[in-house]
Image: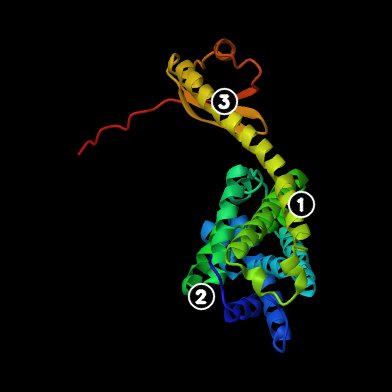
Amino acid sequence: MIGLGHEDLQRMRDALFIEGPDARRRLSRYWLLLPLSAVIASAGVVSDSTATVIGAMIVAPLMTPILGIVLAVVLTDGPNLRRSLLLVVTGAAAVVAVAWILGFFVPYPVVAATSTQVASRISPRLVDLIAALATGAVGSVALARSDISDTLPGVAIAISLVPPLAVVGLTLESGAPHQALGALLLFATNVIAIVASGIVVMAVYRVSWMSPTVDSRSGHHLGAVALVALLLLAVVVPLWINSVHFNRSSIQVTEVQVIANRWAAGAGWSVLGVSDINDTLLIDATGPRPAPSLVDLRQDLDTAGLSTVAVRVQLLPGSYVPVPKSTK
């Protein structure tokens, strides 16, 4: 069995719990870095900059109280559990508020149609839960083992905490509550996954055995573990629905792409792309006049068993004109 010493437990408590003589300094550090990371994340989403969003992930201190929840649950430390939960909830609300306020200074709506950073965070799937579980496990192992603690910056980048909250605030201000709900689901998924996998890792390292309380040895902390399991099950359902919808949409886009290419080629046209926007497939095609018949396209789709798929086509008439040869 893998075990840790009391010095390791004290090191983890010092890293995660805001208590003791330096509690005020650590708390001020948390509330200094969190709003700044919210501004950075919001700027990255608005500017559609992946590098800026990654910077916000590194600066954000939200991972600390989340892992604090893990350790407090394992140790059945009620005061620190409540303190860590309060920091996560109030911190998340603060990030959403900062992003919402910054949204007033953006002259256009920050939604999926205008930012790929938003589009990538409003429809979480089961694969996101799997990634979050693995990332949470790595973070907990890095916390337990000081010899691999240098992987924590990578964990901060791999897990998405502040950016989805920034998306929640920006999309709410832009009048897109459905997209905000999707981003909030991604944040909740990541938090629950970190807590769930972290508890498992702490069990492997037998951290609860070092708790000075009788409750941790008698199994009274199983109630908190059961609650985490229920929360994990609660997020699986919408994630599974999103995954099914994504898979169906991907298959339909591929099938329509093939049919549209054949339809356009018959008239000397080219399909520039096929995309799924709000359950409607959009086809962009260009070529010389006359434009190919949309009735023929509908018949081809019906024949392929896609009669229930809503399709819109943007026809861009045009032709290639050769550049005159040089007279020199």
2 or 3: tag closer to the N-terminus: 2
Q: Report, in whole angstroms, how far the alpha carbon at label 1 lies from the one at label 3.
A: 30 Å
The one nearer the camera, 297 or 214, is 214
Neighbor class of circle 3 (other Cα within 10 Å; few <14, some 14-19, many 20+) is: some
Local secondary structure at mark 1: helix
Residue at the spot x=63%, y=33% of the render? 244
Task: Relative to 88, say whether 111 is above or below.
Answer: above
Q: Report, in whole angstroms, how far the alpha carbon at label 1 lies from the one at label 2.
A: 41 Å
Residue occupied by mark 2: 146
Mark 1 vs 3: CB contact within 8 A: no
Task: Relative to 90, say whether 158 is above or below.
Answer: above
1 or 2: tag closer to the N-terminus: 2
Residue occupied by mark 3: 252
Residue at the spot x=47%, y=19% of the render? 264
The one nearer the camera, 53 or 284, is 53
- The reply, left or right, for residue 82 in relation to residue 295 is right
Q: Position of residue 313 (x, y in %)?
A: 59, 24
Q: Looking at the image, can residue 70 be seen?
A: yes
| Mark nearer the viewer, 1 or 2 | 2
Number of marks in the rendered image: 3
Q: Amino acid at mark 1?
A: Leu
Local secondary structure at mark 2: helix
